[in-house]
Amino acid sequence: MKYALIGCGRIAANHIQAAMSNHLEICAVCDIKSEAMETLLVKYGLEKDENIHRYTNYKELLTAERPALASIATESGIHAQIALDCIDAGVNIIIEKPMAMSIADAEEIIRRSGEKDVKVSACHQNRFNVAVQELRCAVEAGRFGRISHGSIHVRWNRNRDYYSQAPWRGTWAQDGGCLMNQCIHGIDLLRWMMGDEVEEVYGVTKRQCHDYLECEDVGMAVVKFKNGAVGTIEGTTNVYPKNLEETLYLFGEAGTVKLGGKSTNNIDVWDFAEERENDRKNKSFQEATSNVYGNGHTRLFADMIEAIKQNRKPYVDAVAGRNALEMILAIYQSAASGQPVKLPLKDVASIDFTGRFS
C-alpha cells in the first residue's frame, strides 16, 4: 500500500517508524523545509531510497503520487485544510492531533470524508496502549457497575527551548496551549471511557510560567456527563524539572482503576469486586516506552490499513477527533466567559480566544 507523509517535524519520526513496521510502501515525504525531510530519512536509513520522492508542496505530491494512505503531521493550524485536500483527492488519511482547530473544520472533515467514502483516523494513539485496552475491555464488560467519576492528570514540562524550536507552538492559530497540545490524548481517553456524551463543561485556564506564549500553560475543568458521571481534567506544562506523569482514574460502584506512567502506559491500581483470571496480571502491568508518545502509532497504522482493506471505520475515527477537540474548545470558552458551557458546541475556534492573556 502506497503511503506518504506530509510534515517532517518532531512527531513525524513516529509516523515513519509506524509505516515501516507495517510494511507500507513509502512513496513520498513532504515538508516546506528540505532539510527536515533529509534529517528524518537519514535517521531511518532511507535517504538513498530512490523510490521515496521529496516534495515541498503537498498538493503536487497528491497529484503525482496518488497514495492510498497519507498522514498529516504538520503544525496543527493547517491540519484541516490539508485533510480536506487529501479527501478531495481520494486519499485516506491519519491526522495528527488535534484534527482541526475549529468545530466547523472538524465537522466538514467528517461530512466530506463520508461523502467521498474516504477513511479518516484521528491520531489518538494512546487508545492502543495495552493498559488502555485492558481498561476499555473492563468498561465494555460492565465491570465497574455504575461509573461515579473519573479524572485525567497530565503533568508535564515544556521549557523555552521546546517553544523556540517551532515558533508556531503556543499560538492560538497554529497550536493552542497545553490542553490542546499536550493534554488532548488524556482528554480523549477520559471522554471515551466515561460514555462520550457530555452535558456541560466548566473550565479555568491560566498562563502562569510561560509569558512568551499566547496560550495557557495550565488548565482545569469539571465535566458533567449525560449518564450522571463527573469528570475532572488537570493539564499543565509547568512541572519542574521534567515530565512527571499522565494518569487516568476511573471509579465505579464495583471497580477502581488507575493508569499511570508518562503516557497512561502502566496499570497502577486494578481492583474489582468480582476478581477474574487476568486481574492479577493487570495489577502490576507496565508497558515499556521509549518516549511520551508511547507505542500506539504502529497499532493505529495497522488498524487503519485493515480498515481500508476491509472497508470499515477506523477504530479511532474522525468523530473521535472532533469529540476531543470539542472538549478543549468548551474549556477555553468556559474559561473566557467564566460560565459553564453546554455541549454540543456550534461554531467555536481556537482563534476566538486570541489576545486572552495579553
Image (cartoon, rainbow, N blue to C red):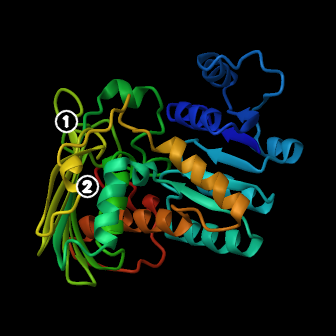
Q: Amino acid at mark 1?
A: Leu
Query: Real-space Cα distance between discs 2 and 1?
Result: 28 Å
Q: Is residue 192 left or right of residue 313?
A: left
| Extreme-right residue of the structure | 64
**Circle 2: element type:** loop
Q: Amino acid at mark 2?
A: Asn
- Which residue is nearer to you in this view: 271 or 294? 271
- Which residue is nearer to you in this view: 198 or 161? 198
Q: Which residue is mark 1?
A: 244
Q: Is residue 215 visible?
A: no
Q: Residue at x 36, y 24 (%)?
A: 161
User: Residue 51 placed where, x, y %?
Assistant: 83, 27
Residue 278 bears which disc, if any?
2
**Circle 1: element type:** loop
| Residue 186 position by quadrant | bottom left
> Of circles 2 and 1, which is in front?
2
